[in-house]
Amino acid sequence: MSEHDKIRELLALAAADALTSTEEKQVAEHVRSCIACSNELGAWRPIASELRRLPTPQPSSWLVQATLARAEAKLTEQAEHDWNRRVMIVVVAFAWLLTIASWAVFHFVSGRFERLLGPQFSHTWISFAAFTALEWLAGGVAAVMLAIRQRGERRLV
Amino acid sequence: MVGATALSLEGLVAVDADVVRLRRGDLNALSELITRYQNRLYRYLLRIVRQPAEAEDLFQQTWLRVVEKIRSFDASRNFDAWLFTLARNLAIDHLRRIRPQSLDEPLANTWHSETVADRIPCKDHTPLDHALAAERRTEISEAMAALPTMYREVLTLRFEEEMKIEEIAQVTAVPVSTVKSRLRRSLEQLRYALEARYPGGTWQ
């Protein structure tokens, strides 16, 4: 491909201001000495110029208001969702704390606190862990079932 | 020039501040962003899908997606490019769903939209100049509307959105070289279409 052909391929992009500075210099230099390319560049310029001045279609004010209302509702819903999640984390942490504390308190009240640290220590803690895990498993299953149901209801809405 | 640059920088800072506020869940920031981008976003969507009803639906979906994804937006990135990428993805999915052929093939459909400002005659031009300019714009608009989607898209991003080639590459998720070749081909097709309609360059 000759230099002339290469430059000719760049002319449309030159009118679109889409050349690198090196390419721009090459085109400017070539166009000064080549009438055909100069004319060709002249033919591209009005197209580029008209494209820049095309009328801008505007959305109706109703569309903008409706969009804003829907987006705001979504934002509020997300904020509520985040708040619920934070509350859930606090509640779960509190429930764990309560579970652990109640176990110790129960033993203390029943006068068997020392057994917690005694030879029966491992058995006590194994049964405590099993009891707690079972409780939380049941709670988790219930939470998942509720979440699935809630998601289904949201889809229907 | 310096004034324009300062204004543009001011706009960028305002957008950044609105984006930060929106990430914190500020409703006013959302309103500011929608107001700021409403014309550009709607125009872009309309150029891609060509049907006002579809563009309106996608306009709403885009802002809902913005609300949904704003927290994953990397603040070091350009918000314009991110917003147009979201809009583009939705528009392309929509086109794939309703008219699978429309991504590459031109449709014999025309659109013409004129704002009130466009109908007001300018003092510096005669009514004839104004009528001729309006006619030229109509001709370009119609020729552009008949181009394939990817060509319409690159033309609107470059000439109407005034995006740099690198930004267009970011929005369309293709290399810079591909953007350049698409831009060149789209201009060539547009010119052929205009010359075919108006032989001898009479459209000018």
Image (tube, coloured by chain):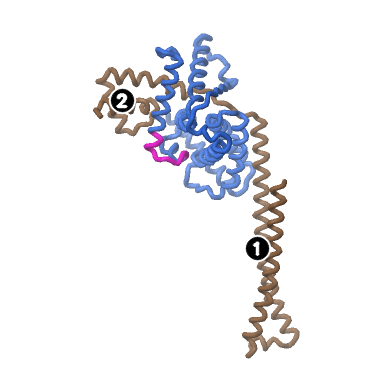
Chain colours: A brown, B blue
Of labels 2 and 1, earlier in sequence is: 2
Q: Secondary structure at mark 1?
A: helix
Q: Name above or below for residue A75 compared with residue B4.
A: below
**In whole angstroms, how far apart are the C-alphas of marks 2 and 1?**
66 Å
Q: Image check: A12 left or right of B157?
A: left
Mark 2: amino acid = Arg
Q: Are marks 2 and 1 in contact (CB under 8 Å)?
A: no
**Residue bearing the label numbered 1:** A89
Q: Position of residue A124 (x, y in %)?
A: 66, 84
Q: Residue at x 43, y 31 (%)?
A: B2
Structural crowding at the residue carrying mark 2, measured as other residues with C-alpha within 10 Å and reported as few (<14), some (14–19) or many (≥20): many
Does B177 appear in magenta?
Answer: yes
Q: Nearer the viewer, mark 2 or mark 1?
A: 2
For the point 63% across and 90% down, which residue is it?
A119
- Where in the figure is residue B183, as x and y percent of width and height? 41, 30
Residue on which the image places disc 2: A8
Please tell me whether residue A92 is drawn above or below residue B174 in the rendered image: below
Judging depth in this view, the residue of A89 and A140 nearest the camera is A140
Left or right, residue A54 beside residue A4: right
| Extent of the magenta region | B171-180
Q: Which chain is disc 2 placed on? A: A
